Amino acid sequence: MTMDKIFDAKAAEKRIYDDWEKAGAFKAGANAQRDDTFTIMLPPPNVTGALHVGHAFNHTLQDIMVRWHRMRGFDTLWQPGQDHAGIATQLQVEKKLMADEGKKRSELSRDDFLSRVWDWKGQYGTTIVEQMKRLGNSCDWSRNAFTMSGAPNAPTGEEGNFHDAVIKVFVEMHKQGLIYRGKRLTNWDPHFETAISDLEVENIEVAGHMWHFKYKLAGGDTYEYVEKDEDGNVTLRETRDYISIATTRPETMLGDGAVAVHPSDERYAPIVGKMVHLPLCDRLIPIVTDEYPDKDFGSGAVKITGAHDFNDYQVAKRCKLPMYRLMDRKGAMRDDGEAYDVCVDRAREIAAGAEATESEIDALNLVPEKYRGMDRFEARKAVIADITDAGLAVMHTVTKKVKDDEGVETEVSEVVPYVENKPVMQPFGDRSKVVIEPMLTDQWFVDAEKIVGPALDAVRDGKTQIIPDSGRKVYNHWLENIEPWCISRQLWWGHQIPVWYVPGQEDWYPICAATEAEAIEKAKLQSADGTDFRIVADEQEAAALLAEQIKLMDTKNEGEIRSFEGPMEVPMFRDPDVLDTWFSSGLWPIGTLGWPEWTEETSKYFSTDVLVTGQDILFFWVARMMMMQLAVVDEVPFHTIYLHQLVRDEKGKKMSKTTGNVIDPLEIIDEYGADALRFTNASMAAIGGVLKLSEDSIKGYRNFGTKIWNAARFAEMNQVFEVYDPSVMPTPEATVNKWIIGEVAKTRAEVDAAIEAYRFNDAANALYAFVWGKFCDWYVELAKPLLFAEDEAVLAETRQTMGWALDQALIMLHPFMPFITEELWGTVQTDRGLLAVTDWPTYGAELIDADADREMNWVINLIERIRSSRAEVHVPAGLKIPMVQVDLDEAGKTAWTNNEALIMKLARVDSLTVGAMPKGAITIPVEGGTFALPLEGVIDIAEEKARLEKSMQKLAKELGGLRGRLKNPKFAASAPADVVAEAQANLAAREEEEAKLQAALNRLAEIG
RNA sequence: GGGUGUAUAGCUCAGUGGUAGAGCACUUCGUUGACAUCGAAGGGGUCACAAGUUCGAACCUUGUUAUACCCA
């Protein structure tokens, strides 16, 4: 039965993948023949995710390495898994909850909501796994991991212990003082109502406005305001009773703690230290000096809102200014706490020097009643309007032309508030897309500065190598300037922070422990004997219970010094926050392998080998994994980090739904097959290269698959597989057969060197060039005369050689195109196991027969020259023509005799006669001789002359360069000997050719 | 503003001091017994610009221009 003309990827891929899985071909250690392990951790895709082209690219590279190592006998593990993706997943489930039941998350209890998330995960969490299988990923699915596995509320089937690892690390790091809690200015996402890290913020330039307000000096004071130009000439002098400030966010003025000016700013020197009236508020704030204000920007005076701006926060800390929080979790103006009057009174006392704790200041709500509860953008409008009404906006005169009813234009001047239109950088949440509000909140932090050292050393010392090298600089730069890492998130879906609070001296006192029971134990150790702790739901409940207990205590211990005297029930509640997703994925390498419960089966795969990931998460993830693995197990997580860019469309644009240029890898697989997509990915993978994916190139590599398919089809039609014995290495006599064996060996070395060096594009190109350019274009064509000949011995050796060469091609192509190669492997020979677990060859240069190599190059060169000459003088393609051997050396004669049949067939030559150069013939110069095609009457003399002259010109250019170099005495003196020798040999060959061409021209001149 | 890249054929890109390559596209020819998802032949480049190092520079150095991404 003859094979089909094409490989039906759609029909075969699923079947082939099932065969692999059934055979356990991807299980850790499959085909292992040595102790060396090779491990790759799949960067866990979000459990909410769908496979996109970025994954497809990323996974292709990993699969190539994994399959290659597995075939080479390494104890190989490709560890797969998914990330629980805190915000993204919670959002999905919230959306579904709203769509299905019209409910908000807050209408459910935390436990109920979490069980919905787990349900969701059970239903949709395997989608991406199935998609990865379609790409051909050879992951060990039996070890599939999940970053939330083993969490307290995890259902059956999610028993892993990733949660244990995360909690253990938190507790350990807390114990070592590497994790702390504090009130810090953080990026607050008002949509998700959680803090996010600075890496999750996108700063986007948007059209904004700058408003200018007057803050009047207290007590009606005035001062001389003087402006000078560059030369010191006075350009403005006036008496002012205010200082002018500029802001892009007017609503934050309600929380101002001061106005700052630069210490060297002469304009404001007279009023530094004085107080100003904060508009719309019953507060006075001081004018302070700080290096931060830019004298040339705006008025040079900056309002300082420590609780709502990162720069102001630093100024406020330096100048010890109070920081008043103005907004609530949703980004609306606060509507909690005491009445405005009460709060302002207290704020005045604090401003005057009264002691106050952080939490007391935070509790003060300095938003005037009027604005309370307003959305921040509404409040902005109201504040602007009210300040303008109060006459405190800086005004300017605008002249415009107005047409009256009769169309007569008149100029009208009016005085309006001065508002500049200018682009401003505004922070947006990368997931929520809402404006991020810097906000002073209580959060947990990793003191990253304390653990970066080993991570920096590991890369500096080369324990871990980053590819491309530029990644190292970026890595160092970031780690050297690392900021505390905010790891708490105000979400429900995630690893809840293992901290419980009990009443403390001033505030709640945190106790960090792996479990509730341990926390209670710890708390007991720190309390009076007999104290009992009661776990309550949250802070409110704890506060209520505490108040009750204190009342009881008052009655019990009346008249005595207050002290707890058992049995007392002390409230205890758990921190409601969860950990940043990147905290858990930071432990991916050890967490997936079962740490802290290592077993020999799992720990042998650590440290892992290569991490393949996008450049964009170098900070998010890679650097953090380095830090955390080194901090926890004191070992680098991987020896090589391969970073690649974002996959873009063919024009280099980012793919996005809005632009509509998204390429869906699954559609591509449907249309062209997974192998085509994979090979395209590999061929794009130049180190550090820009990745532009175009459907044209995918189509091209689909054609490549068809090409090798048809080469196999040709072999099959010529009974190659009936005779071919895979256990026997071919030892042919025919030059062509010897030659292709050498070409296989060269390719093997090239491919291995390329993969070794992570140059997947070079490996792919080498395979493409071999299979198409050598095997199909030449070997199959050259073998035809041998296969059609009657000689049994030649026929047998050619079939054996072709079978072997094809097998080698399949083996070497397998990591790149696993499906089609596996299918052909099974077609060529049944009952020999799966290609996926077949051994990779090790042969090298010893298979190259130098004589055969030289001879075939001579033959190919001759055929090409004849073809080229024929085409250029328009000899009909089908016409067979005679050829004359004018002169030829011994090697040439041997080469001719050995390959006469195939040269004549491929060059369409019907006879060869030995003789003198006929008149009007085309000269075919070859190494060691000259042939001629007698085409008098057929060729156009003038055209042929032009052709030869053009060749001469090209030669002359080359000769000029070569001669110039060789004539230069410094070249001979400085250049290496082999380079000089090569140049000389090259010159000799070119000169010989030039002579032949000149002779040919001379002969043409004789004729016409 | 700081950092990191990139600039080579019409397009997409390789190129590791020795004189320029691939794929696609294009032109011409061809269904010769694997493949038209194919074959044969061909055209096409001042390697962004300038200076320097070198016997020799696409490659190393410096500057300029353009451009991309990351961080402010």
Image: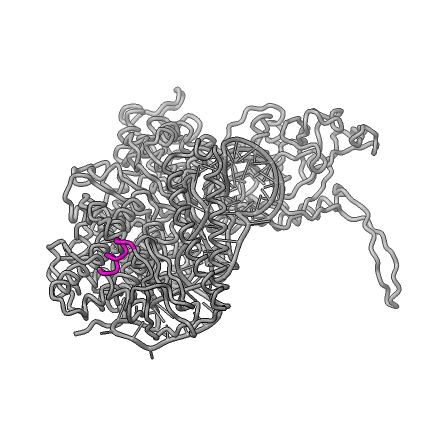
| Residue A715 placement (x, y as % from top left) | 20, 66
Q: Is A763 on the left-hand or right-hand side of A435?
A: left
Query: Residue A642 or A155: which is nearer the viewer?
Result: A642
Q: Is A893 within the magenta?
A: yes
Query: Residue A310 or A386: which is nearer the viewer?
Result: A310
The residue stretch that appears in magenta:
A889-897
Q: Is A63 on the left-hand or right-hand side of A108?
A: left
Report the quarter where the N terminus of chain A lies. Answer: bottom left
Rendering colour mode: one colour
Q: Is residue A263 above or below residue A776?
A: above
Query: Residue A303 or B63: which is nearer the viewer?
Result: B63
Give the main secondary structure of the magenta stretch. helix
| Residue A885 placement (x, y as % from top left) | 31, 62
The quarter holding residue A444 reads top left
Q: Is A741 within the magenta?
A: no
| Residue A170 placement (x, y as % from top left) | 33, 34
Q: Count the marks.
A: 0
Specify whether residue A18 is in view. Answer: yes
| Residue A825 placement (x, y as % from top left) | 18, 61
Q: Is residue A819 above or below residue A221?
A: below
Q: Residue at x 39, y 53 (%)?
A: A684
Specify whether residue A198 is in view. Answer: no
Q: Residue at x 30, y 29 (%)?
A: A523
Q: Is residue A532 above or below residue A824?
A: above
Q: Residue at x 84, y 60 (%)?
A: A402
Query: Residue A306 or A451: which is nearer the viewer?
Result: A451
